[in-house]
Image (cartoon, rainbow, N blue to C red):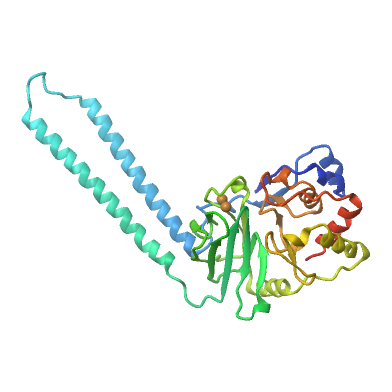
Amino acid sequence: MSLRLRRPLAAGCAAVATGPAAPAAAMGAAPPSIPLPADAQSLLAAAGPQAARIEWLWWVYVAVVVAVYVAVTIALCSALWRGRRPEAGQADPRLDARLGRGVAAAVAATVAVLIGLLAATLPIDRQLARAERDQAITVEITAQQWWWRIEYDDPTPSLRVTTANELVIPAGEPVRLRLLAQDVIHSFWVPRLHGKADMIPGQQNAITIQADAPGVYRGQCAEFCGLQHARMALLVEALPRADFEAWLTAQRAAAAAPADAAARRGREVFRSAGCPLCHAIRGTGAFASLGPDLTHLASRRTLAAGSLPNARGPLAGWIADPQHGKPGARMPAVPLPAADLEPLLAYLGSLR
Ligand code: CUA
């Protein structure tokens, strides 16, 4: 079973999409989808120790709230059923005393329940706040309208890695996340790995996440941050340690040199079409940081913060008309003749 996340797609993709899907896309058929497991974003499918604590607390709250609801309903029904009232003008001191005791008992029970919930919450909060020792990896994540900059720390500056919207971590290890915001308040939330953590301009928050098993976990900005808040998604991919090391090594490399004439032409288009004003591709002299780093764009699963699958057609549509797939996106439309768009797609598609 898989969750198919359907997204509208710029008509432009159809024009340059290749392969059997092209005619269907041109006729307005179902847009490409991003296949993910059905529980990729479920709080009730904890995939690590931090999320497991939150899930346990969630069930405690559900049990207590259901018990309170049942108790109140029984008390209400019982009161309606008995319906005893003193005759008009006749006080009943015994009934008054019993009602007084009932109200006092209900207040005491309410206070006890609230204190009990607080007592259950505080240790979990402390455990989540405690930084795990021996974290080999620290990743800085900066939220901005409407995507995630992801930077892997390293004491050696040349070994730092910058990517976007897809956080890759080793499975079974705690990873420290430093959470920042560039413009407005956002919130980091990958329900299978941790609770929500605010990302506030000018302030650094930190959480530790751990995925016990390899897999892909979906996250979502959880604080309204503007027009495209709903399309500010994030994928976390947990890999076995060796695969993670290989991924990190590959990400540290500068962009591969174009392998053929089309890709070489595409690199020239990238340089001349204004792309380097916002984007970086290491090894090409493009180093702007307004938009996502594109050095290894083709290695990612999605475009536009989880809005589109990373494939040739959607990428073409995204370049030609970003406002169609993601209204409000900061990416300006880059109208290019097909003679330029085709090589640009070939070049971007080669950035693995
Ligand atoms: Cu970022 Cu909501």
Asked if residue 177 can be seen in this view, the reply is yes
In-front residue for pair 348/57:
348
Which residue is at a point 24% across and 26% down the rendered structure image? 81
Asked if residue 168 can be seen in this view, the reply is no
Which residue is at a point 82% across and 60% down the rendered structure image? 270
Relative to 21, residue 186 above or below: below
Q: Residue furthest top?
A: 88
Which residue is at a point 8% across and 19% down the rendered structure image? 89
Relative to 132, residue 326 above or below: above
Residue 78 drawn at (x, y percent)? 24, 30
Residue 349 drawn at (x, y percent)? 81, 60
Count of numbered badges drawn on the protein: 0
Residue 166 drawn at (x, y percent)? 65, 61
Residue 79 drawn at (x, y percent)? 23, 29
Relative to 73, residue 17 above or below: below
In-front residue for pair 351/55:
351
In this rendering, position of residue 245 left or right of residue 51? right
Location of the C terminus (image quadrant): bottom right
